[in-house]
Image: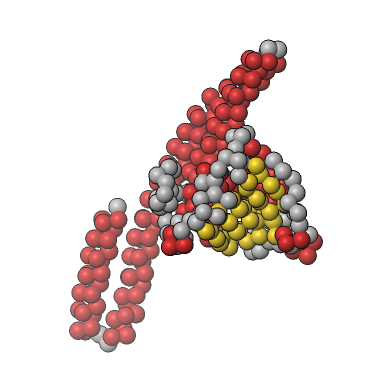
């Protein structure tokens, strides 16, 4: 479609130049412009309307396919969830209940992946609505999810911070940061997560990043040279989300010491005057997971 439209546009331009040349032979320049301007605007409007309609048809078709596909995926998820609830009520054996719990946990992860897939597809068609949330409650919920992996000890020092944001997009970003903190640190090392004024800080004590690599970590498919695990797109997703939503992102790291990711939500905070702020320097680490 693009090459066809470009070819048509060039042909129209050539014809208009020929017409302008012919008009200039018989009329004053400004008379020629006055006569040809409505013609040019009309042709431009027709071309724009045609291309716009084609684009809208493609978007409607894509939206229909996405909705149908997501509906088909959601059906077996709902069926599995209903059967898990029935099994949980009828099983008394602890060993079998443990198995059902593992299936239920896997289903929760599958639902999370479904929500993320739905989000990523829909955001390509229409803007995602933002919602009000308390960052403190949100982070506690995400840490509770990662606690099930039985890895690092999480130490939290969180205060209420109300923001207006795309929740699922934020979940993807925070999950990517926490996953990196877990992946690149020992299983028994701590991960600190705290709020300092309008900033959320996630700090690990893992392998860290070389200083000459810090400028490269946001590149899509980039991987830290000491490891080949992962696809190298996590921080690219985080950076893109932060840029689109006015979140100031900063990463500090030192090889062999660890990494600190700082997200400043000052542009998204609701009711700044009523939000309680505390300096992390004056706080002891609170809740331990």
Residue closer to the observer: 25 or 220: 220
Of the 4 image quadrants, the one containing the C terminus is top right
Image height check: is 202 above or below 118?
below
Place of residue 186 in the rendered image (x, y in percent of width and height, measured from the top left): 55, 43
Image height check: is 172 above or below 277?
above
Question: Residue shown at 58%/51% (left/top)?
Answer: 205
Residue closer to the observer: 118 or 56: 118
Place of residue 34 in the rendered image (x, y in percent of width and height, measured from the top left): 34, 80
Place of residue 198 in the rendered image (x, y in percent of width and height, measured from the top left): 68, 61
Question: Residue shown at 66%/39% (left/top)?
Answer: 144
Place of residue 288 in the rendered image (x, y in percent of width and height, measured from the top left): 72, 43
Number of marks drawn = 0
Q: Is residue 237 left or right of residue 97?
A: left
Whether residue 138 is visible, yes or no, is no
Question: Residue shown at 58%/23% (left/top)?
Answer: 103
Whether residue 99 is visible, yes or no, is yes
Instruction: Report which quarter residue 251 is drawn in.
Output: bottom right
Image height check: is 164 above or below 67?
below
Residue closer to the observer: 118 or 226: 226
Question: Residue shown at 66%/17% (left/top)?
Answer: 97
Instruction: Report which quarter residue 52 is drawn in.
Output: bottom left
Judged from this view, the residue extending furthest toward the front is 256
């Amino acid at each position: 479609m693009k090459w066809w439209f470009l070819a048509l546009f060039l042909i129209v331009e050539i014809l208009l130049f020929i017409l302008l040349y012919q008009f200039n032979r018989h009329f004053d320049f400004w008379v020629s412009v006055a006569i040809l301007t409505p013609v040019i605007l009309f042709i431009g409007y027709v071309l724009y309307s045609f291309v716009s309609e084609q684009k809208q048809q493609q978007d409607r078709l894509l939206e229909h396919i996405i909705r149908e596909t997501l509906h088909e995926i959601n059906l077996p998820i709902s069926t599995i969830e209903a059967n898990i609830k029935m099994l949980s009520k009828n099983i008394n054996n602890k060993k079998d209940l443990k198995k059902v719990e593992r299936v239920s946990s896997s289903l929760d992860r599958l639902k999370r992946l479904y929500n993320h897939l739905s989000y990523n597809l829909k955001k390509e068609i229409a803007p995602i609505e933002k919602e009000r949330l308390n960052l403190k409650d949100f982070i506690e919920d995400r840490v509770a999810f990662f606690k099930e992996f039985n890895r690092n000890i999480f130490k939290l020092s969180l205060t209420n911070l109300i923001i207006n944001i795309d929740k699922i997009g934020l979940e993807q970003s925070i999950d990517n940061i926490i996953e990196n903190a877990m992946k690149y640190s020992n299983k028994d090392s701590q991960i600190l997560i705290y709020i300092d004024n309008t900033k959320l800080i996630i700090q690990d004590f893992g392998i860290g990043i070389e200083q000459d690599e810090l400028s490269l970590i946001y590149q899509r498919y980039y991987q830290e040279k000491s490891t080949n695990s992962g696809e190298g797109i996590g921080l690219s997703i985080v950076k893109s989300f932060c840029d689109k939503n006015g979140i100031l992102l900063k990463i500090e790291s030192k090889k062999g010491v660890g990494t600190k990711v700082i997200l400043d939500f000052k542009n998204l905070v609701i009711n700044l005057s009523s939000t309680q702020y505390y300096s992390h320097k004056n706080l002891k680490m609170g809740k331990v997971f």
